[in-house]
Amino acid sequence: MQIESEIGAKLLWNPNPDNQDKIIALHHKADLEKKGDWLKYIDWMTRNVIAFRKAFQGRVKKLDPTATSNEEREA
């Protein structure tokens, strides 16, 4: 998938067809008890937030929020 290629990771997609909200997730194991690893976790989160923004910003701007179907929204 192109978005996953841009982000550089396999994403978990939950389109939640019965609701307006949609979930796209990326997980990373972390042991928050290990304070020495916190900077590593923050770096991972920062890199991925930036990657998500780059991958989705233009796509989201093109969506039509008044559309009633998936085809209309993506037009």
Image (cartoon, rainbow, N blue to C red):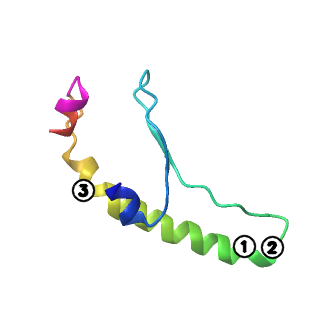
In the structure shown, which secondary structural element does the residue marked by tag 1 occupy?
helix
Mark 1 surroundings within 10 Å by alpha-carbon count, few (fewer than 14), some (14 through 19), many (20 or more):
some
C-alpha span from label 2 to label 3:
36 Å
Q: Is residue 69 magenta?
A: yes
Q: Position of residue 67 (x, y in %)?
A: 20, 28
Q: Position of residue 32 (x, y in %)?
A: 79, 63
C-alpha span from label 2 to label 1:
5 Å
Mark 2 surroundings within 10 Å by alpha-carbon count, few (fewer than 14), some (14 through 19), many (20 or more):
few
Is residue 4 left or right of 25 when viewed as pictured? left
Q: Which residues are magenta?
A: 67-72
Residue 68, above or below 63: above
Choose top left, top right, bottom left or bottom right for residue 54: bottom left
For the point 66% across and 76% down, which residue is it? 40
In the structure shown, which secondary structural element does the residue marked by tag 2 occupy?
helix
Residue 38: which disc?
1
Q: Which residue in the protein does label 2 denote?
A: 35
